[in-house]
Amino acid sequence: MIRIEQLHKTYPLERNAKTAGPPVAALSDINLHIQKGEIFGIIGRSGAGKSTLIRTLNMLERPSSGRVLVEDQDITALDNTGLHKLRQRIGMIFQHFNLLNAKTVAANIDWPLKITGKYTQQERNARVAELLELVGLSAQRDKYPSQLSGGQKQRVGIARALANTPHLLLCDEATSALDPETTQSILRLLLDINRKLGLTIVLITHEMQVIRTICDRVAVIEAGRIVESGDVAEVFLHPQHAVTQSMVAESTPFSAEAALLQSAASVPGIEQLRGQLVRLTYVGDITYQPILSSIAAATPALITILQGTIARIKDTPYGQLLVELRGEPEHIAQVFSTLDQHNIRHEVLA
Ligand SMILES: Nc1ncnc2c1ncn2[C@@H]1O[C@H](COP(=O)(O)OP(=O)(O)OP(=O)(O)O)[C@@H](O)[C@H]1O
């Protein structure tokens, strides 16, 4: 669906600088492949380059070099007419909604249909009604943006972005201005739209919780470079880069995992342990199988659970356990080999 190849973006001047400052390398050698129908998240700290990157996907920002292919078309080579057509295939929603305040909800949603000049009034009315229904705002059709809550405004933004049946939806910090409950309802709506319409969604966020709730894959950006990318469960459960590790550790629902991710020294009573301290991670259906009981029944090794969590990342269940293993070396080896057979990752921490 999208292929980003060796993308670089350098801003000539420091932002807000009154006089010319040194150039800012906002994106350096970005290479990404985003598949049709997936929800792809780009996460990073403030100033990492997220907005610049997502804006290159519809050429709101022109890269300094490199290519962006959307549905096999190199969009960096498009002229204004080509860009106009491209933007009808790509919807976008924004942190601050960007609604037309003087227009009603229905008129905001109608606007992108009207400017194409392709549809009759009757066709537009029918499409607007359909979109209002999709985002759950039929009763608000004649209200103005100032009469809506933040969540409702974002629903209007989503309906407007979908008006011309785009193939791709870009979400620029779409839930950052919303409270946690409203954030969840907007994320559920995006997931629902992704599933119902098969729409590819690319979002940028600084919140791990957003990635964990709806994304299939994620790329972590830091100082203009992709430092890590992959399936969300893999990146969350085994973050490799220091930035990813700290963002996972900071995200509240992951506090239990954060403890598990930290050094063995964080385990209460560590000094009393006599065996090996091992972290087990399992992902998928195996989460609900009695693997530990089977191992305990098959070997004389002693397994003590010290800490653990079972949760979900999007639809994928996973478990992480910190256990102490005690026994003869051959029994411990037997435990590890059984874990291997079941694809349960094990790391000896101490
Ligand atoms: N128009 C501009 N002119 C000069 N520098 C810019 C411009 N836009 C962005 N930058 C710089 O490029 C870098 C990346 O900015 P960008 O807005 O893409 O990051 P971000 O990850 O989206 O940050 P935030 O989460 O704070 O919005 C920053 O150093 C920023 O100051």
Image (cartoon, grey):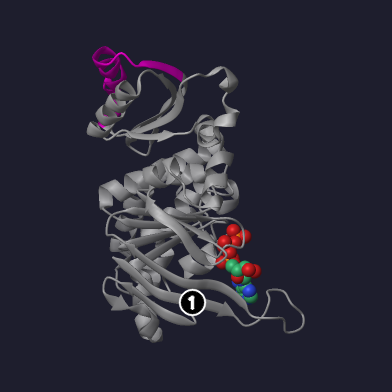
| Residue 281: percent from left, percent from top | 37, 33
Residue at 41 percent across and 35 percent down: it is 347
| Residue 8: percent from left, percent from top | 48, 77
- Pick the residue in front: 139 or 13: 13
* Residue span colored magenta: 285-305
Relative vertical location of residue 264 with respect to residue 77 in this rendering, above or below: above
Question: Can see residue 139?
Answer: no
Say which residue label 1 marks. 8
Horizontal side, residue 11 vs residue 62: left or right = right
- Pick the residue in front: 264 or 163: 264
Q: In which quarter of the image is residue 346?
A: top left
Residue at 29 percent across and 34 percent down: it is 284
- Pick the residue in front: 331 or 108: 331
Q: In which quarter of the image is residue 185?
A: top left
Horizontal side, residue 71 vs residue 237: left or right = left
Q: Is mark 1 on a helix, strand or loop?
A: strand
Outermost residue, right direction?
18
| Residue 99: percent from left, percent from top | 53, 60
Relative vertical location of residue 202 with respect to residue 280 in this rendering, above or below: below
Residue at 31 percent across and 33 percent down: it is 344
Question: Can see residue 15?
Answer: yes
Q: Is mark 1 within 8 Å of ligand 1?
A: no
Where's the N terminus, which quadrant? bottom left
Horizontal side, residue 287 vs residue 326: left or right = left
Residue at 52 percent across and 77 percent down: it is 9
Tell me if residue 218 is in the magenta stretch. no
Outermost residue, front direction?
329
Where does ligand 1 appear, by image quarter? bottom right
Q: Give, as a three-letter code, the residue at label 1.
A: His
Q: Mark 1: few, some, or many residues within 10 Å (few <14, many ≥20)?
A: many
| Residue 303: percent from left, percent from top | 39, 17
Tell me if residue 292 is in the magenta stretch. yes
